Structure formats: structure tokens, C-alpha cells
Image (cartoon, rainbow, N blue to C red):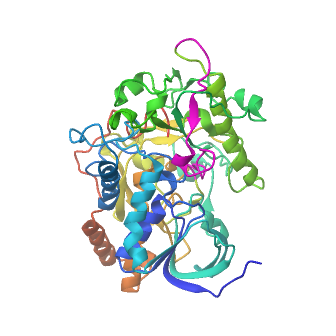
Amino acid sequence: MPTTTAEQHTDVLVVGGGVGGIAAALAACEGGARVTVVEPYGWIGGQLTSQAVPPDEHPWIETHGSTASYRRFRQAVRDHYRSWYPLASDGSARPLNPGNGWVSPLCHEPRVALAVLQAMIAPWRAAGRLTVHTRAQVERAWTDGDTVTALAVRLADGTVRHLGASLVLEASETGELLALAGIEHRTGTESQAQTGEPSAPDRPAPLNMQAATVCFALEHVDGDHTVDRPADYDHWRTRTAPGWPGPLFSWTYPDPRTGRPVTGRFLPNPRSTAASMEEGLIAPELWTYRRILDRQAFRPGLFRSDVTLVNWPMTDYLDGPLFDVPDAARHVRRAKEVSHAFLYWMQTEAPRPDGGTGFPGLRLRPDVTGTADGFAQAPYIREARRLVAVTTPTEQDLSVAVRGAAGAVGYPDTVGTGHYRIDLHPTTGGDGYLDVAAHPFEIPLGALLPERVTNVIAAGKAVGTTHITNGCYRVHPAEWSIGEAAGALAAYCLDRQTSPHGVRDSAKALEDFQSALTRRGVDLRWPTATAVAPGPVGGDTLPS
């Protein structure tokens, strides 16, 4: 029988070891705190690893618009390839992009991200300052008034441990702490009356959430590697979505910006090397879109095939939310079934450039995803429960159509920066794509703070956005910036014996904390010359 141990106390308890959670843990440890991280999957890293989503980034990511630690992570990924992979050249002509995918200037394997993140946290684990529980699940939260006092966590061995902390950071993929601790939050779509957003609907719909996706890794080699036909294949094969010109399983889908049909190209292992973003805008090349290993970038003959990551419009799961519904577990299973069915369609029915059908040489790569079957360990959940926060960034704060040449709203309490188009996928309630040009924006400290609860800080996707602004806050560098600010704030509060709200409410404390962030290498504001880029990075003809 599982046993329950006595409560253990730490300075900072991080719920979720994804992109934001690990950035938060690093910042808090560096600030002198003792930190415990609770992560439900086997790998830390979230979007970067267990969800197998290569980074979605903005055009200036190489130099600014993020944090120094995020740029160190990116450089360490490149250094890993240069140190251990035999490259075709020294890669000095341009920044190394191992997959030469056109979604980002750094498309790489999930395992490499995992190796780098493990290396980044290693000193703090060795010093006894950081404890990371993987395959651990938060089951219950205890509160005392406006404070979260402890969490019951079931560890991988089945034991239940009661963990208490001075400060608790919400960095989970679904905002699970908000629900467990009864912290005010929202899900789905708000109404225009609630937010004033031009793109918001007339009525709120809490279960109308962005589609989730179960990603998978593929190569193309000789032989027939066709997977078993899914039991519900006919259902998925004929599934449609709002605004689509035909079935979801097709190379043709609606352009997220215009709604007009776009037909993508699909040719495994093309002869050309680096994929062209400009080419992708004209007629998207699906194989190279999220390619994470380009065989031609390495020593000739080392790899038989490229490796590409499938996270395309056709694999979105639209039949229901993956949380906050009684049958959530069923929806999680069916989200994977969609991806399984789409792979079967590609292997057996997909039109080929030569006029034939099917690509039986497509083969799953379980080693890439760290699973038995080649599908990601965790679904990519674009939209979590969202904190009812002190400050809620809205569409009119950063929309190009609303703000014009004025740029995004500036916040006196900025703790970081981000940029991406407002990129919303079709929803479980029947909405089609929403793709809105957005200015580079600042992240307000108030968006990390609950209106009521005093010792919880949002450190990831549960930050206090709206359904709409979640579309540009959810990507990798923004999530890292949110997490780093949250972890640094936690350490600052512990060191100075103050509260998160107290930092924001005191002009002197806020200025001092922002100075500390600047010393860490956090970009608090964008250079005045920064303009919205016309190119595809930061939102393109294939949504993220």
C-alpha cells in the first residue's frame, strides 16, 4: 500500500517542470532559494521535450527579446551538436539549425533539449538546493485563507508526500494548481463584454478551448512501416473543421490569416538542404516545416533519413477539452488516436507528387520522443486554465490593428518581453483559426499575480492572459521569460521578507527587483527601432 510521509518544507515549490517551471527553478536557485519541482512526465522541459514541439520564436531571438538564460540554453543546444555530432561543415557561416526547419532558426531533437536542461540544473541538484520529482502528480492542495499551505504529491514509487513551501509557482501545462487550490481562474473564451477585445465573441464559453495536439517524430526509409489501421479511422478520415475546404486529412487546409485554401507540399528527404521560409509562405513544405534533424547538415552517410516532427493543422484534436470535463481521460486518448490515424492516412492514402498514394516508408522514431511508440509523451496543450490576475493583457494592448504605429502598451511593472502573432487554432467549440498581427510586447508582473492568493506566482501557461492573448504568450521564449521572472521574484521575496504583491505595490521595491532582472540579462523593454517583421517567423502560414 502507498504510504504517506510527514510534510516536508521547501522555500519554493514549482508545480510543473516544463519550459517555465525549469526557468523558474533555475532563477530561484540562483537567487539563493531551496526549490522542489513536481513534474508529471518522465522528462523535464515540457514543450521542448515531452511534448516534442521545436521552439516557436520571433525574428530577433538571436540577440534580444528574451532573457540571457534562454539565449544560453539555445547556445548550449548548438554547442551540443557541435561537440558530439559530426557536422557536414563547421557551421560557422550562420547560426546552426540542426533540423533546418523553417518554423524557427533552431529546430532540434527533444533529447538534446533534455540533455541541455539537465546540465543547466545539475549544479543545483548536486548542491542539494534543487529536488526534481518526475512522474509525480499533485493530488490535493491545502489552503489557509488566501495562502496555499501544502500539496499532496504522489511520487513515481506510489508514496504520497505532503510538500509545503513559502511560495508556490504554478508552471503546469493545464494550470492544475488553480483548480486544486480554488484559485480564481478562467478557461475557454471570454466575451467581448468581459475583455473589450475586438475578436472576442458575444458570449463566454468556458469549454471552448484551442485544440490540443499529440505530436510524433518520423523518418522515411526503405520498406513498409505502415502502422495498424485505427479502429475509428473512418471517423477521423472524414472529420472536418470550421473553415476547412474539405476533410482534415488532406494536404489542403485554410490559411490561418486569410481563410483561403492552401495546399502544402509533402516530399520526404528533399535534396535541398536549408528550408526556405519565403518558400514556405508561398507553398508550405510540410516535411521541412518542423524538421528537427537534417541529414545533409551532418557527415555524409551518417543518417539514412531526416527526422521531422509532425505538429500540423491536420492533427488538431477538436472533439473536446483535455481537462475540466468528466471524460477528460477519454479525450486525451482520442487526441492520440487522431495522430495515429493521420499517420496511417499518410502511409496509405496521402497523394504523392508522382501521382501515387501513400508513403509506407514513413516510420515512427520512438527513440526521439522517449516513448515506446514514437508519439510524444504528453499532449501539446496550447491553452491552460488562466489566472484571474492583477493585470490581464488583452488583444487591444498589443494588436497591430488596434495599436497601429504606437506599438504595444508599455507596463510600468514589466518583467520581460515576448513576441508572436496572436495564433489561435480551431477550438473545441467550433471556432476556426484566429491569426492577428501583434506588436512585440512587455510582460507585466501583475499578470503573474493572483488577485486574491498571496503566495502563488504564475510561472508558465497559466499566466493571466485572455483566451486571445494566450495565443502569443504560450510560445517557448515567452514561457521561459514568465518562468524566469517568477523564480527570480520568489527568491527576491524570500531574501527581503516581502510578498510578491508587495514588490509590485512598492515603487522602490519594484524598481529594485527590475534592476535585479536587468542584471540577470532579462530584457524588460524592446528597443524603439523594433518593428513587426513581415516574415514568417513568429506566426506563419502553418499555425503553431
The reply to whether residue 488 is visible in this rendering is: no
In the drawing, does residue 289 fall left or right of residue 515? right
For the point 43% across and 80% down, the residue is 129
Q: Which range of residues does the magenta coloring cover?
A: 354-383
Quarter of the image with the N terminus in it:
bottom right
Q: Using the image, determine if residue 313 lies above or below residue 179.
A: above
- Image coordinates of residue 506 in percent, x first then y, are 36, 77
**What's the magenta bit mostly, secondary-structure-wise?**
loop
Q: Which quadrant holds residue 524?
A: bottom left
Q: Nearer the viewer, residue 80 or 431?
A: 80
Q: Nearer the viewer, residue 540 or 505?
A: 540
Task: Report the label total.
Answer: 0
Extreme residue toward the top, this view: 355
Instruction: Based on the picture, tell me whether residue 362 belongs to the magenta stretch.
Output: yes
Q: Nearer the viewer, residue 35 or 60?
A: 35
Q: Using the image, determine if residue 204 lies above or below residue 282.
A: below
- Image coordinates of residue 391 in percent, x first then y, are 47, 62
